[in-house]
Image (cartoon, rainbow, N blue to C red):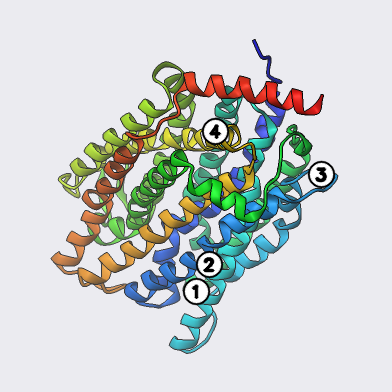
Amino acid sequence: MIQFEKINFKEKVSYGFGDFACSMFWTLFSMFLLFFYTDVFGITAAAAGTMILVARLWDTANDPLMGMIGDRTKTRWGKFRPYILFVALPFSIVAILTFTTPNLSSDAKLIYAYVMYTLMMMVYTAINVPYASLLGVMTNDSRERTSLASFRFLGGFAGGLVVTATANPLIEYFSTDANIEAGYQKTIAVYAFLAAIFFILTFTGTKERLDPEEVDVASFRDDLHDLIKNKPWFIMLGAAISVLIFNSLRGSAILYYFKYFIGDQNVIYFGHVSQSVLSAVFMTSGQVAAILGVVLAIPLAGKFGKKNSFILSGLVCAGLSALFFFIPSNQIALIFLVHMIISMSSSLVFPLIWSMYGDVSDYSEWKTGHRATGLIFSSSSMSQKMGWTLGGAISGWILAAFGFMANQAQTEESVLGIRLMISVFAAVGALMSVGFMYFYPLSETFMNKIENELIEKRKNNKG
């Protein structure tokens, strides 16, 4: 029986710090950015949706390129860790500029938004693809990868929790003289500073164990050829994109849902509560529930397998999201309860996705003789970008199609669009992920066989 090197608790926590940093901005992109562009920055929902589509489609093409560059990087710090260190500062600077509202004409502001959002996605790629790929070279053990992925997403959801709990209060605090534009800029500066610190902690606290000389590195052309023939990769790409569409639609709708549908409420035991506070608590409660979902991912995957756990999560999310549409605006407790169950269930798949991409990477090496960890894991980042792209663009277009006008009393039709976006339309994305995952072929038994054969092959190559 092949014995695998175990990863200690401290290193797993250090690895999780990287997703703490990334997920602060993931949360800002998925829950605050569209609202920022329409209700603060001052562009229309349709223009914002189209901008998100154009900028992210361009950026999505960068992900495989960054993965292949990482695969061919050789430094004394490893293949992927140097990017986490050296991109941390540019990431933070561009993040602040992305959430800055310049004093420009409408056309010039739209150009500024295109340029800064495109740069933001590019620096995100430059740090997130190497960070994701790092998991594939820290250990060969599929079980340890699932554990690392769970620590990653514990860190990730903790980062999201920090944002959902503090963003609205910080924005209000920094919005002196009702200057909400300054409030957003200064709030993002706080998060950018924290992100840089946590990226550095990830760099210093992790180790790349897989010797790059143990496996063959093919040409760019061969890598792409191998990827095209990799059926599990295509299935994972489709499933992950669908999951991100689900999350993006729900996340993008939250601030609109509370501002224009829920409004201020008299909540039992708490009295009058503003929609701003309700939305902050709503997002935060979802992040808390999501952390529980990440914790449950390991035992559920161990009992039912990664594929079956993924499918179960998608079915629960689809059913409850459809139910969410029918909850009246004054049923706050029920709204929060259903949301927390959805958040817990949807978070199960994220550790599974990253662990499964590690399995796909091993499968590719086993089948072709070439290892392309960065390229395989860059596809996970690409799926994130595509999910954000489609979900964010669709969100903007839905708002426009239903007649949304920022900072005005909404018509019944526009409110209906917001409600559908957070519920029924999102449910379609969850069902799509189930459809893709039904065809996923890499079982736990098959992966044990692949892992053992690869270990023996690498030992023979070194001998």
The answer to whether mark 3 and mark 1 are in CB contact below 8 A is no
Residue of label 4: 363
Q: Amino acid at mark 1?
A: Asn
Q: Earlier in the sequence, mark 4 or mark 1?
A: 1
- Binning the other alpha carbons within 10 Å of mark 3 as few (below 14), some (14 to 19) or many (20 upward) gives few
Q: Judge the density around disc 4: few (<14), some (14-19), many (≥20) Cα neighbours within 10 Å.
A: many
Distance of label 2 from label 1 (alpha carbons): 6 Å
- The quarter in which the N terminus is drawn is top right
In this rendering, the count of numbered labels is 4
Residue at x 45% of width, y 29% of height: 442
Q: Is residue 168 above or below residue 159?
A: below
Residue at 57% x, 56% y is 63
Viewport quadrant of the C terminus: top right
**Disc with the residue nearer the chain's start (2 vs 4):** 2
Q: Amino acid at mark 3?
A: Trp
Image side of residue 179 versus residue 366, left or right: left
Residue beneath label 3, please?
77
Marks 4 and 3, the one that precedes in the sequence? 3
**In the rendering, which numbered label is found on residue 179?**
1
User: Judging from the image, what secondary structure is the residue with disc 4 in?
Assistant: helix
Q: Which mark is residue 183?
A: 2
Q: Earlier in the sequence, mark 3 or mark 2?
A: 3
